[in-house]
Amino acid sequence: MTKQFDLVIRKGTVVLREEVRQLDIGIQGGKIAALGENLAYSEDTPVYDAEHLHIMPGMVDAHVHFNEPALGHWEGFATGSAALAAGGCTTYIDMPLNGVPPTVRLSALERKLEAAEGHSLVDYALWGGLVPGNVGNLQELAEAGVIGFKAFMSCPGGEGEDIFAEVDDLTLYEGMKEIARLGLVLALHAESEEIVSELAAQAVKEGKRGALDFVATRPIAAELEAVNRALFYAEETGCKLHFVHISSAEAVQAITEAKAKGLDVTVETCPHYLVLTSADLERLGPVAKCAPPLRTSEDQAQLWAALADGQLDILASDHSPCPTPMKQGNFFEAWGGISGAQSSLELMLDEGYLRREVPLPMLSRMLSLEPAKRFGLHPRKGEIALGADADFALVDMKLSYSLQESDLLYRHKHSPYVGKAFGCRVKATFLRGAKVYELGVGGAEKADGIWMRYAAVIGGEDGG
């Protein structure tokens, strides 16, 4: 018996939650309506032939900075989402900085939503911010639909009166109590400001300006101290925690031990910590500068071991772009952030699956399922399952290429991965059953990405 579908994606190698199988996918109304071998469908049904391609759930990138409002000339929703679509990402969660104003009050959230409306190729959710003086604003942001809150335990940088500032201990403690009451998650940039600022001041005083000088000012000890302090406050307050861009196995281990004690905590790392090292930072220059910094090859090997052991929950890009001139000069003055969102999925498939033989369902869990579950986007997002949104990345695992500057869809075309050889490539990306990117063709003409407002997601409705 034939069924009516809006689209059938035929004979793809489909990455499911626990296995990989060749299947047809029937799509109706933007949802996955059928999964099976040799689906029966009417003759007039559009068909996309995916034989010889792997079909992954669209990546859910929980950590991007598109810098709206006011700093869209650094990236913006249009170019940022186009780059994500080209990289197989179908949903992202935008951070509350570095826009002006940052998303720490309702009026700022409304300005960000105005900037996003009609400009995002893929779906999006939004973080709110926790900063000194705004604990009383968290409830209105939660009610408006943010998926959680972000705070810095070290200085995020920036100039002017209305910038995103790091939390002091009292703000962190009081903020955690309020976020626990609201039932949301606090995401933390965990580095000790006292340690890193003092070490940086000493280095500058001594005239040190190089790559390894910068790395030495942000040691693993600074990350570990902040992680342990935050875990203590979480235990006292009952606040759910998510640690962003963790760079060391030592910090992962501390978080793993906290999970074993019953704390509701998750940990994220980024592709750049898994494919680049401090030696690459010396070679590439400030284009690879980030905080926490890239670590040694030995540290990286330990992080991969933690991943293989199942200790990492989420892989996210921490895409932090800027105009190219800001990536020049000495390491202490150059902007600290890596442009990498377009390459995240391919990096993890190339290095994780093709080179290290990490199973595809395991990688997919960290790239898609776990971020969707943690931040209230599942079951709509995060996996290929009946009833879920028809969000897919179609990947040719045998199509090798070398990333060129001209391939990048960022507003500013710099990335530490330019010139890197990849063993796979995203061929097409589908959002709710509509093709939003195809290799050799480009992105969709119309930006139909929607806001995945947290309360609406829970209710099973579209954002808006």
Image (spheres, rainbow, N blue to C red):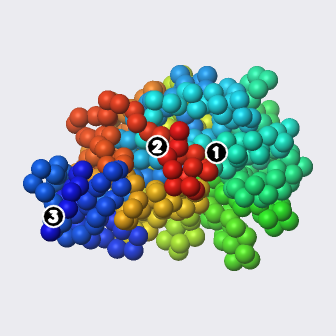
In this picture, residue 110 sits left or right of residue 372 = right
- Residue 204 location (% of width, % of height): 76, 33
- Residue 344 location (% of width, % of height): 44, 49
The quarter of the rendered structure image containing the N terminus is bottom left
The residue at which mark 3 appears reads as 2
In the rendered view, tell whether residue 94 sits above or below residue 267: above
- Helix, strand or loop at label 3? It is loop
Disc 2 marks a residue whose amino acid type is Asp
Instruction: Residue at 78% x, 36% y: name it.
Output: 165
Q: Nearer the viewer, residue 43 or 124?
A: 43
Instruction: Residue at 58% x, 32% y: name it.
Output: 113
In this picture, residue 355 sits left or right of residue 115 = left
Q: Residues within 10 Å of mark 1 (few under 14, many from 20)?
A: many
Disc 1 marks a residue whose amino acid type is Gly
The residue at which mark 2 appears reads as 123
Disc 3 marks a residue whose amino acid type is Thr
> Spatial distance from mark 1 to mark 2, Cα to Cα?
14 Å
Q: Decide if residue 46 is in sight here.
A: yes
Q: Residues within 10 Å of mark 3 (few under 14, many from 20)?
A: few
> Spatial distance from mark 1 to mark 3, Cα to Cα?
41 Å
- Label of residue 133 in the image: none
In this picture, residue 298 sits left or right of residue 32 = right
**Marked residue nearer the N-terminal end (1 or 2):** 2
Instruction: Residue at 67% x, 50% y: name it.
Output: 148
Q: Is label 1 in contact with label 3 (beta carbons under 8 Å)?
A: no
Q: Residues within 10 Å of mark 2 (few under 14, many from 20)?
A: many
The residue at which mark 1 appears reads as 145
> Viewer-nearest of labels 1 and 3?
3
**Marked residue nearer the N-terminal end (1 or 3):** 3
